[in-house]
Amino acid sequence: MKPTDLANDIDIKTATIDISVDDDLSNSIAVGGGTVLGIYTPSALTSTTINIMVSYDEANFVQMVTGGGTDYNKTVAVDNYLPLNPQDFVGVQYLKIQTGSNELADRDIEVAIRRVT
């Protein structure tokens, strides 16, 4: 596979935290047959941590945990790209991003997902 082919296999999906609906939890985004590569944080973000909620059916979400059984949370900063281990997301069909504190306004967090064929 040529390097240019790899770039064509990456989708960017937006997880929006809409404070009129929930001030610390995003909408659901479909990972489908792909795997998460990383997260782009917006230029404004109240929280400094995120957690990942996952689901196989988009109805029942649970906290994603590490192999050691602790919550899968990451420290984040504004206007950055946070690379994630794609192997951690094998089997995930849907995800939501939860911030560690209430956001003061709507936030769009971009999630890079590589299609796996």
Image (cartoon, grey):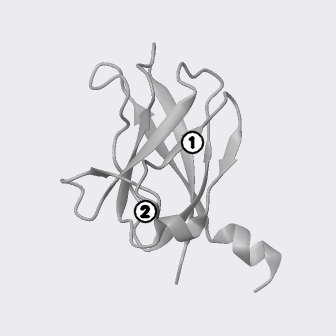
Q: Which residue is mark 2?
A: 31
| Residue type pointed to by label 1 | Lys
Q: Residue at x 53, y 23 (%)?
A: 47
In the shown orientation, is residue 36 left or right of residue 65?
Answer: right
Residue 35 horizontal/vertical position (percent): 52, 67
In the shown orientation, is residue 34 left or right of residue 96?
Answer: right
Q: Nearer the viewer, residue 24 or 111?
A: 24
Q: Residue at x 62, y 34 (%)?
A: 76
Q: Residue 74's mark?
A: 1
| Residue type pointed to by label 2 | Val
Mark 2 vs mark 1, CA separation in Å? 19 Å
In the shown orientation, is residue 59 left or right of residue 2?
Answer: left
Residue 79 horizontal/vertical position (percent): 70, 31
Residue 62 horizontal/vertical position (percent): 28, 52
Is residue 8 positioned above or below 112 on the image? below
Q: Residue 16's mark?
A: none
Q: Residue at x 47, y 50 (%)?
A: 72
Q: Residue furthest left?
A: 59
Q: Residues within 10 Å of mark 2 (few under 14, many from 20)?
A: many
Q: Residue at x 75, y 86 (%)?
A: 1
Residue 75 horizontal/vertical position (percent): 61, 36
Is residue 55 positioned above or below 32 on the image? above
Query: In terms of secondary structure, where does tag 1 sit?
Result: strand
Query: In terms of secondary structure, where does tag 2 sit?
Result: loop
The quarter of the displayed image where residue 40 is located: top right
Residues at circles 2 and 1 in contact by the CB criterion of under 8 Å: no
